[in-house]
Amino acid sequence: MHKLQTKIIFALSSVMLLLTLVITVASLASFRDFSIRAATEHTRTAAEVIRVALTEAMLNGTIDKRDSLLGRIANVNGLDEARVIRGPQVKQQFGDGLLGEMTADTTDLNVLSSGESVFTLNGGILSPEFRATIPYIATSDGDVNCLLCHNVPENTVLGAVTLTASIEHMKSAAIMTVAFLVIAVGLFAFISILYLRRMLHPLVTTANEIETAVESAIAGDFSHRIESRTNDEIGKIATQFNALSEGITNKLSLIRENVVQLVQSKPDYHGGNLLTETAETVSGLVRVSRFKQAIEEDETAGEVFLRISEVLEQEFNIHTFSLYEVEQNKKMIHPVMIDGVPEAPIHWCDPAIHDHCVGCRAVRTGHLIDGSENTQICRSFSIDAAATNKHYICLPVIESGSVGSVVQLVFDVAEAHKVRNQRPLLEAYLREAAPVLQAKRLMASLRESSLKDAMTGLRNRRFLEEYAETLISQCKRRSVPMTLLMMDLDYFKPVNDTYGHDAGDQVLRELAVILQANVRESDLVVRYGGEEFLIVLLETNAEQAMPVAEKIRGAVESHKFKVGGTSLSKTISAGVADYPNDAQAFWQVLKFADVSLYAAKEGGRNQVVRFHKELWSEDADY
């Protein structure tokens, strides 16, 4: 039996039992009181009859026959005994009397002493025998004057009459009546319980079904429905609960359909809590949206790759992975992030893919490569990793129809199922990242193009304009010097005039190669304009820069420039000025280097001139 039904029926049964007990006790008490009252009145009447009879017998002179009178009265239906006890004054006047009139018990003596009637049950409250001991008190009032015969004061107790009567018939009647009431109440209680149980059955059954449905809903299953058994409030509850479940099911289905559209893959709901799993997926999509907003505001593609690395480690708990950037035009692939370390060497693949990107199956096919079951599907996967039972999934990031990046996930066999379940959400991240990466790279390419000289591949003057202050700030922050070499190819115009501009361009390209070959990678070589070049020697003062400038001058002088079918020998002039010894501002240092170059030209060319104050004149026109 169900708890609710049991509680209600138990409560009703308890009330009915208590009611039966109260009725039984009240009925028995009422019948007892009624029986005693009836017996009391009955014995009072009999006592009065005896008193009158004895008085008449005394007046008529037949008092000696009173024993017969008492015997006949005792045989009256309802009376078991009738006897008279003489009081002390009567005994003193008339003697002890008959034998029965001399036998007195304690109750008789108490009544003779107190003059108060006693009505009681012999043997206790359950005894069927009722006893009444009533005193006869002398009085001169009324129809008979007791004092005419008795020489006693008024209100003297002359004697007492004791009557016993059976109330067994009343007791039996009371028991029968109470039994009838108890049976009637019990029958009413039984019928009430049956009716209540019938009324409670739909409520209890509906409540149990709702409990089962709610437990299933907590587990993510909203398919349970409640049967509507009545047309009252219980039936309405069942109907409304079904409508609620149906609404939740429809909304959940709609959410799942939208999730499928967003992630472009059906999530694997593997028998868990569908509501929780769907909510987690939607929450993941919210994080994807926030991720997109964040990477759109990042400055470079490198920052975007860093965020992808953080997502893999923090959200997906994947710590062994590779992020590759593909250069399709150069057929190269660069490791951007390996296991969270920027620009680390290729670890999970054959390093040969670095210079041969089509060796990567994901790059070559543009399809997802799932090595979670067969690690040999891609021949470029690390043999050492495969030997340690590592598996992988490679996700190509498509940009404008070609693979721009590859995300490689590496994991143990035990994690394969988890990674496959995470893949749809990760692909959503990568789809959002793809256009942003493409845009960042395009902007970087455009910016790089705008800061480079197309012919020589060197930095151009615009680059210098943008980064001049940055260079000075770095020197100030690190307290290091910086030297500028302003260089100009001697007699370059005749080359263009004699051999043509193509030949002149070839000479400048070869000169750019010579300049780069004679400085450090950390130094900057800038085509300042025409045949003028600027070299920025970082962490170098003018004294240290002079040998470098001479080295370059000598290299140019000894080089044979190929022009058409002939060779040319050219020289170069250079001016040297440094920060912070010559000036505190970049453009002022540059001006001093240019002045020194002018001095080198004026001094016969093919030489290096270090700036000194005598070269500068405020009135000169440079």
Image: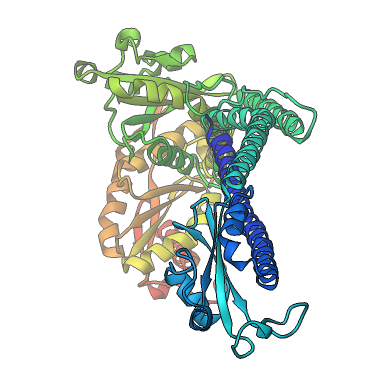
> Is 166 or 140 nearer to us in this picture?
140
Colour pattern: rainbow
- Farthest residue in the bottom direction? 153
Q: Is residue 293 visible?
A: no
Give percent across and percent down for residue 191: 67, 31
Residue at coordinates 47% horizontally, 11% vertically from top-left? 365
- The quarter holding residue 546 reads bottom left
Whether residue 262 sits left or right of residue 347 in the image: it is right
Give percent across and percent down for residue 463: 52, 50
Q: Is residue 90 visible?
A: yes
Whether residue 512 sits left or right of residue 158 in the image: it is left
Residue at coordinates 33% horizontally, 49% vertically from top-left? 522
- The quarter holding residue 190 reads top right
Residue at coordinates 59% horizontally, 61% vertically from top-left? 65
Give percent across and percent down for residue 380: 31, 15
Whether residue 27 sits left or right of residue 488 in the image: it is right
Report the number of discs. 0
Give percent across and percent down for residue 352: 29, 19
**Residue 324 drawn above or below residue 116:** above
- Farthest residue in the front direction? 61
Residue at coordinates 53% horizontally, 77% vertically from top-left? 618
> Is 517 or 31 nearer to us in this picture?
31
Image quarter where the C terminus lies is bottom right
**Residue 227 drawn above or below residue 559:** above
